[in-house]
Amino acid sequence: MAMIRPDTEHEEQSVRSNVFVDESSTAKAAVDAQGVVTRWSEGARRLLGYAPAEVVGRPLAGLFADAETAESAARAAEEARRSPEALGRWSGTVTLLHRDGEQVDVPLLAHLRTTPDLQASTGTGTGTGTDTDTDTDIETETSTGTEVSSEAPEASAASRADAEWLLVSPLSRPPPCTEDGELIEEFFVQSPCKMAIYDTHLRLRCANEDMERLLGLAQDDVRGLRLPEIVPGPESENTERHMRLALETGVPRQLAYSLRMVGHEHELAWSLSISPLRDHEKRVRGVMVATHDVTSQHTARQRLLLVNEASVRIGSTLDIGRTAQELTDVSVPVLADFVTVDLIPTVNEGGEPPSGPLTGRVTLRRAACSSVFEGVPESVVPVGETDVYSDYSPAAESLLTARGVVSRMTEPATNRWRIQAPERAAKAREFGFHAMMAVPLRARGTTLGVATFTRHRRPESFEQEDLLLAEEITARAAVCIDNARRFTHERETALTLQRSLLPRKLPENAAAEVAFRYLPADTRAGVGGDWFDVIPLSSSRVALVVGDVVGHGLQASATMGRLRTAVRTLADVDLPPDELLTHLDDLVNHLAAEAASGQGVGAPITAESAGDVGATCLYAVYDPVSRHCSLARAGHPQPAVVSPDGAVEFLDLPAGPPLGLGNLPFESVDVDLAEGSILALYTNGLIERRERGIDETLAALSEALSQPTAPLEEICDSVLKALLPPHPADDVALLLARTHALDANQVVTWELNCDPAVVSEARGEVSAQLADWGLDEAVFTTELVVSELVTNAIRYAEAPIQLRLIHDRSLICEVSDGSNTAPHLRRARVFDEGGRGLLLVAQLTQSWGTRQGVGGKTIWAEQSLPVMGL
């Protein structure tokens, strides 16, 4: 007998294999591929009377009643062996010869098995645990066979060539279960499955003990009632409908419900099997309903679904409030009836949370909340507002201990609320709060806030599994909120840097009226490097610039600032647009090389970011005297011009390569603009949309711009409204300039000879002109400036010499000559006869400078005019 340890559990105790199983009640034999008997059991001896020694090693054909039967059996065996559809199995009745000569009809089941399979089936072999008093006369010899597989017929037949047939036949057959009413009845009553039988009128006939416990009623109390009469509700109505379908069609049905039964505190999940019951004539005589409690499987599945949904839904954006709201939305109503997320105030603003553990009363800002009720009436603190949490509250306790807290709303806790937080206590009583759970939001070792879960409609209290689930989804949300916080911090830093680098107010100028819009990107990519500028130039001209740096974030903003500064410096030199872009391209190449070598300011640039410095730019110079505009672009979208009659034209400028490619030329294009024309410059964030083609976008832009007389501010708003989505995916810069022109009487030009005598004549002409303009107070200074500039041109330059006065908001004096040699300001020594002219001009005027032209240079000086009294 098998030995049992005293401490062995009852369910784990082993028993003898023949206590319930009589091995000798079945005849078993094994036959090899050649038809020779290799094994013979005690049951086989009892069936046919042959001892093992009389049969083993002899052909099985000798046991058949006649040769024809043996041949038929051999053909059937061969067919079963070769046919994969037969699965290596044959069944039927054969006539065999008993040892005493009588013919015996034997119901036979034959299995084609390899030797290990045969040993497992017969209980023989060399393994432990086999009783020595069963099948002792069966050989324990082990041979190697080939596993049966579902290969092609040829391969399957080959693999079975060395297999053996296991033949089994019962010596006697017990009566069918239908004749053993007592056994059936006891099985039905004691079955661990909850079962009930209904007749063809769907009236309850009987229910087993587990079903009685589930219903909370004895079957004698409800026999003859329909299911909706026993357990009223929509689930019962639906179940009865499927019971009727099972009776009508004879097809079983499967249902699943989640509901709370009488006597159960929690809602349970049930799986229902509805099966029609037939009599021996195959007539449907009733229906059986079997119910299985699958609450644990259902709960586990729901928890996995919630975790999966949380991983998908939480963190869809890098917005702190949106991420917090996603956490509350995911948790209601699956986990709780009312959920809030409160963050440390600095976290909401993208700042760093306080270092070290929190102590005492905690101040938090409400970031999000959700409820099973519309409008979240349970909330006391509006979203965005702050509140102080006492140290005894679950939220504060969770933050102070840095772990989840599960609590029940007991009377003492409600009393403390009534004293220190009367509004919260009133809400708790009004909605019937009975269970609360607080979980800290922690990420990367830092506490960001707390999520509070409350139940008031669901009667169940929170359990340990609920806390683990809440901690799982809250941990995911905390990482997403921390990512959003870091992104917000970097974005605000980049915006601050960018705002400091962009012009806060555009300068007033006589050449054009300007308006602009700048919108930073509202995506994970962060703030980009778009910029614009309006630069006053000499002779009342103005330069208009729009550019876009490759990339986003602080690096792009810093690069933008450097390029904007470079453009202003180059513009002061009065370079033509194509030359300015050439110099700017050189600067971008230097920046890229600096980034690649890791010699930039701050930490070295990684290999991934090396060479990513690049930009596009559009530079235009407009002269209000000639109404002439010169433009050049480096990989930037073409500008649009709106004529005074409303027609919109996109200027066909040579695209030019983006800045940073190097050694490629840029080309300028000159156009004349009518007074009142609108020049529109913009970055690609305005016109590049995935869901709309470029032609459609330019058509929409053209329509929005075709308002020649509308204020520029209104046109800017119309353009953004027509072209941009609510949350732009890229930075957008838009600059509009409505051109002005100076009247002919505001500009006077004189052609001068290279003769020192013309200096006095020039002074006289200038004095007369200033008198006509009513600028008598400026005559003395202007005469000195004209004398010095004309004298220098005659002495050091060459013809042609031209003098021009421009009367605008200031008075501008220009002297042009045919020489490209630029003058230099120097300090004259005591006994020097010259060298003081430009110094005198610089001291008498507001500003002065020189610019190169196609045929020479121009020296200009600008002086402010006195403010005229009213």
Image (cartoon, helix red, strand yellow):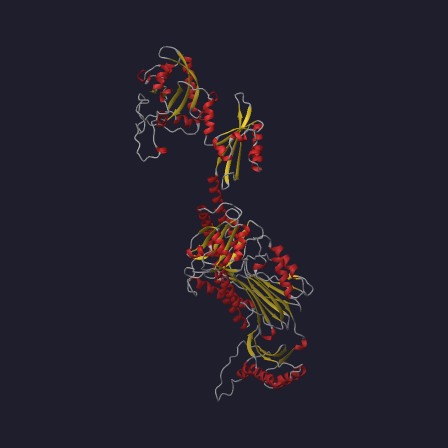
Which residue is located at x 35 percent, y 12 percent?
A: 99
Task: Examine the rendered structure and indicate whether residue 410 appears above or below residue 787.
Answer: above
Residue 440 percent location from the top left of the image: 45, 54
Task: Examine the rendered structure and indicate whether residue 480 appears above or below residue 865.
Answer: above
Is residue 106 something one can see in this rendering?
Answer: yes
Which residue is located at x 34 percent, y 30 percent?
A: 14
Front one among 110 and 246: 246
Drawn side of residue 597 relative to residue 812, left or right? left
Residue 458 percent location from the top left of the image: 52, 46
Instruction: Using the rendered view, name the quadrant where residue 175 is placed.
Output: top left
Residue 284 percent location from the top left of the image: 55, 25
Marker count (numbered): 0
Front one among 195 and 262: 262
Front one among 532 and 647: 532
Q: List the single residue furthest toward the bottom.
A: 831
Q: List the single residue furthest toward the right.
A: 645
Instruction: Using the rendered view, name the quadrant where residue 96 is placed.
Output: top left
Residue 817 percent location from the top left of the image: 58, 78
